[in-house]
Image (cartoon, rainbow, N blue to C red):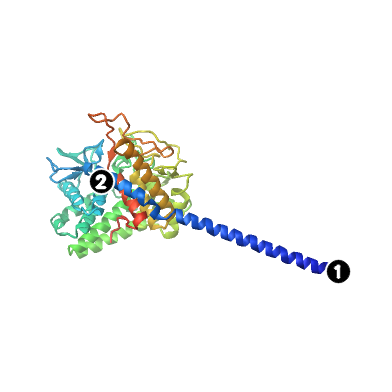
Amino acid sequence: MLRKYNIKFYQVFIVMAICIGLIACQNSEKKASIENEKQNSMDGENLRPLLSDLSAKYETLRPKVIQPAEGYLKYPYLIPAGFYKQMWDWDGFFMGNHFVSKGKPEYLKFWALNLIQGIDDEGYVSGGATTEGPRFLFGKFAVKPFLSQGVYFACEGANDYEWIASHYEELKKVLAYRERTQQDSLTGLFFWDNGMQSGADNNAALNYFTEDKRTFLAPDASTLQCREYLAQAAIAKKLGEMEDAKMYAEKAERLKLAINKHLWSDEDKIYYTVDRETRKFYKRVSYSSFLPLIENIPSPAMGKEMISKYLINPDHMKAKYGYRTLSIQDPDYNNKNIILPFSNWQGPVWPIANFIYSIGLKKYGFSDELYWQAETLGTLLLKDIEKNNTMHENYHADTGVPLAPSDDHVDENGNIVGFISWNLCIENLLDGVVNDNWMLLEIK
């Protein structure tokens, strides 16, 4: 009798094992099917119609940012068409690189030459200019660390370095001026005079009110200056200035080390600004925290952890309509429609911030997030163009509503003036995802 029960037990056991195996196999097949479905949905080819539609719209919008040479601006210049009529430093840099990607590097060259002519004996050059001359804001509004980079990409795009040889010493003066006026003597890091000078006007991680005299060692200022050194080293090498090439490359390396040593919080796994008076982290998760990603300054592990914990996390930077400019956890987070006296970088989705983020996402291997970002931003801008025949500088992160400039800014015909500028770079993001044709702004 006992043997009989044992036989039955083994029979039941075998049947159960077979059933479990079948269920596991079915689950495995189901999981594989889901993964394949997900992979297929993330195929860049699916975004080709969106890229085609956006590119067609950009063909009509792109010429609006080009202005003919006039007055002080001796070369054709680029403006953020619509609300602004001035030539600006980083607007022109990103628009100029977009034109380089279209086989027209001359516009980035013209941008550089218009800035270079404004360099004074000290090495100061204004970050903005009009046909009547340099534009001064908040005292000396110095150009952001983009000039040497712009020269480098213009030269590379045209395969021509001869035109910059006569201006080489002037570029060095600009770098030296920033070292004298915006480099911290204790750490070697760089700071902005104020938030407005950074371009991220009211960045909560910086000071932006005139009565706030604090200055902060900043990951964006330091990263951009590091890239200026790398660009200047590359230019020097092309011009046969080998000692300079070595010097600037060494400065870039020291600056990378300082960024990781002083601005990285190993506890929180992110870069913060540092108050120069207290020498303590100013713990605000903002747009500027992510700039070191574009130059591979964090290690692969550091970069991936920071991106996962903050950038692609809905509890911080990821919103329905793109990546925010300030963490939703920050007490100052908002989506207010502001353009005067400063634009709002305290939460809204900025296409240019998203383009900058995309470089980091690409370099640290976040392909699915790049697909989502390209589809989300491309669709957002296409809908704006179809409705308003223009774009805006930022959008409500949670509703996608176009913000600045608001609808009450209209031209003489009653049309919304809008904003066409570095948001052109979203086409480059889509082109990267669809065609593997990336504009990563790498300095080699």
State the residue in front, 12 or 98. Answer: 12
Left or right: 167, with 15 as reference point: left
Measuring from the top left, give residue 42's x and y in whole percent: 44, 54
Q: Is residue 191 visible?
A: no
The residue tagged 1 is 2
Q: Quadrant of residue 389?
A: top left
Q: Is residue 43 visible?
A: yes
Q: Which mark is residue 59?
A: 2
| Crowd tier of the residue under label 2, counting other residues whose Cα lies within 10 Å: few below 14, some 14–19, many 20 or above | few
Q: Residue furthest right?
A: 1
Left or right: 369, with 112 as reference point: right
Q: Residue at x 25, y 61 (%)?
A: 247
**SS at mark 2 in the image:** helix
State the residue in front, 287 or 404. Answer: 404
Inspect the image, locate mark 2, and give the three-letter code of the amino acid beneath it: Glu
Q: Residue at x 34, y 49 (%)?
A: 51
In the image, is residue 419 above or below residue 412? below
In the image, is residue 161 above or below residue 69? below
| Crowd tier of the residue under label 1, counting other residues whose Cα lies within 10 Å: few below 14, some 14–19, many 20 or above | few
**SS at mark 1 in the image:** helix
Inspect the image, locate mark 1, and give the three-letter code of the amino acid beneath it: Leu
Measuring from the top left, give residue 296's x and y in whole percent: 37, 58
Q: Residue furthest front?
A: 49
Measuring from the top left, give residue 175's x and y in whole percent: 23, 52
State the residue in front, 231 or 391. Answer: 391
